Image: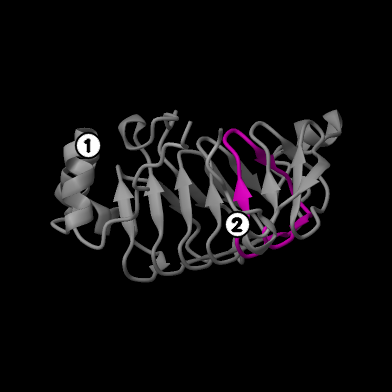
Amino acid sequence: MEEQTQQPARIPAGLLSVEALRQARAMPWKAGNEIRRWLILPLAWWALRGVEIGGDWRLYGLPIIQRHRDSEINIGRGANLRSTPRSNPLGANHPVIISTRTAGARLAIGDDFGMTGGSIVCDERITIGDRVWVGANAVITDTDFHPLEPELRRARPLDAKTAPVAIADDVFIGMSALILKGLRIGERAVVGAGSVVSRDVPAGAIVAGNPARVVGGVTTTADKPNRRSAG
């Protein structure tokens, strides 16, 4: 029996491009998402106030931006933020939240970043490279939020430990993952859905679990065997 193939979906070049019209015919909800995206453009400019962001960005629903006046949020070109359940079949359970909560906090995100729901909370420094995709409802944070010691938590509830987070290029983070403070995720690494990452992840590694452990490695396109017809 011959293997069945179908034309892969690609990111449309424009709202009225051939690819966009093909996808709208096959998947009408995508057309609805694009129409709603254009309708919120005036509000989108307001939502991104205080954020340095490159061109070609797409907002599906309005994100929640919480920026300390003395902090920095920099996002590169091609950002794709999905903040509504309709915008992704995995279902965002709340809008994308991007927050810098302290003076001097610096959040820097590279080009072609994608995120559905979830949160990025920066009290010190979070650096995210190019082409990083973050699955639905994941959380990235560089802070414990509150002290661990009960006495200190009662006296100074916001005096939490912080440590920088660095995520390299081409990393994929699965849905509902939790990325904790003080770690680096190497380029091309994959974090499995629901994982809790509390230590460094080597480049090209696949990690999963709580706590996350290396369970495999990413195969490059050159390493993959040619696909053949079955039978």
Residue at 30 percent across and 45 percent down: it is 60
Residue 167 occupies which quadrant of the picture? bottom right
In percent of width and height, residue 47 lies at 31, 53
Residue 174 occupies which quadrant of the picture? top right
Residue at 40 percent across and 69 percent down: it is 77
In percent of width and height, residue 11 lies at 33, 55
Colour convention: one colour
Residue at 16 percent across and 39 percent down: it is 25
Say what secondary structure mark 2 lies in.
loop
Pick the front one: 180 or 86: 86
Q: Which mark is residue 230?
A: none
Q: How far is disc 2 from disc 1 in space, using C-alphas?
A: 46 Å
In percent of width and height, residue 120 lies at 56, 48
Residue 5 occupies which quadrant of the picture? top left
Disc nearer the start of the sequence (2/1): 1
Q: Which residues are magenta?
A: 164-188
Say what secondary structure mark 1 lies in.
helix
Q: Nearer the viewer, mark 2 or mark 1?
A: 1
On whether residue 175 falls in the magenta region, the answer is yes
Instruction: Name which residue type carries label 2.
Output: Thr
Screen quadrant of the C terminus: top right
Q: Which residue is mark 1?
A: 26
Residue at 82 percent across and 53 percent down: it is 200
Q: Which residue is mark 2?
A: 102
